[in-house]
Image (tube, rainbow, N blue to C red):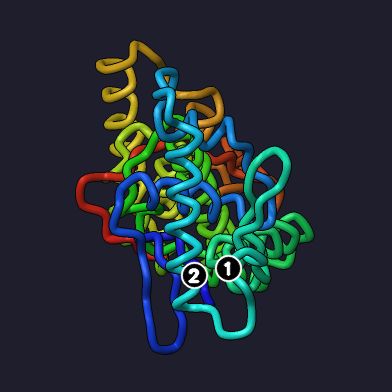
Amino acid sequence: MDVEVLGHVALRTWDSTRTPSAPKARQVLALLLVNANRLVSTDALIEELWAERPPRSALSALQTYIFQLRQMLGGLLRNASPKDVLVTTPNGYEFRIAPERVDLQRYEKHRLAGQHAFQSGDHPAAVEQFRAALNIFAAPPLANVRRGLHLEAEIVRLEESRSGVQQTRIEAELELGRHHEVLSELSGLASQYPQHEGFHRQLMLALYRCGRRPQALKIFNQLRQSLVTELGLEPSRELQMLQQAILSADPRLDSARSTPFPGRTTDPPPLRLKWPAASPWKA
């Protein structure tokens, strides 16, 4: 059985796909799956379902949802008992499954491998691992689930994680001199996220290396106008340094594997984003 949370929440076998029809049962399953192989407390599940106003029947209702989920598992499992997969503990419940069967955990494996390769300077391996991660994480997570406090926090965490993977993968591509190859992708990302300094910095650098210095400076001005107008903020010092380096045609900008250029960050941090209304979800 395979578990999916990156996209629609679902349980899959070779011949069947199941998702609870009841919204709250689906919510319970989603919180258990994003925490697969970790205990989820009864209190956390009740808080997810009813926030700060649980009914008196909250515990019995939760137990009913667990029973429904085990019934669904019974139709999927061949060699295991539902109670051995969705396990009751003294403090809550745990969904036990091999990590390689969970899309989120496969994504995390590739993300961590890519991060290690990037920090070690192995940029080809970093690109390969990050692309594998992004191919798994190719749609908005928990897309068919109503979200309470805990799942909303998971969405934010996953958004930040994917954004960080995408940004660091592009950084590795730039280190390999692939500015032409990433230019179109960066243009789309800067358009979708008009206040994301990381993507704008990378777009400015790619444009400059493609011999398009005026366009690189125009990108800076557009970002600055957006930040000042909507947030009352100036671009970061790093971005301003990159603008000055472009204006002065700093030779450190010309090659990927040279002295760190002005405005470059070694490890681009993930930023908190909302999914755009229409996202191409390109890896």
Residue for point 54% across, 29% down: 241
In the image, farthest residue toward the left = 278
Q: Is residue 124 visible?
A: yes
| Residue 131 - label | none
Question: Is residue 210 or residue 232 the one in the foreground?
Answer: 232
Q: Position of residue 154 (x, y in %)?
A: 50, 41
Residue 185, percent from left and from top: 35, 60
Q: Earlier in the sequence, mark 1 or mark 2?
A: 2
Circle 1/circle 2 CB separation < 8 Å: yes
In this view, the residue in front, 10 or 243, is 10
Amino acid at the residue labelled 1: Pro
Instruction: Name the residue at the bottom extreme.
Output: 15
The answer, for residue 214, to whether it is visible in the render is no
Please tell me whether mark 1 sits on a helix, a strand or a loop.
helix
Q: Nearer the viewer, residue 19 or 241?
A: 19
The residue drawn where x is 40% and y is 66% is: 10
Task: Tell me the quarter of the picture where residue 100 sits.
Answer: bottom right
Cα distance in 3D space between marks 1 and 2: 6 Å
Residue 90 point in image, percent of width and height: 73, 41
Q: Residues within 10 Å of mark 2 (few under 14, many from 20)?
A: many
Indicate the secondary structure of the residue bearing disc 2. helix
How many C-alpha atoms fall within 10 Å of the one at disc 1: few (<14), some, or many (≥20)?
A: many
Residue wearing tag 1: 82
The residue that disc 2 covers is 73
Question: Which residue reaches farthest top?
Answer: 232
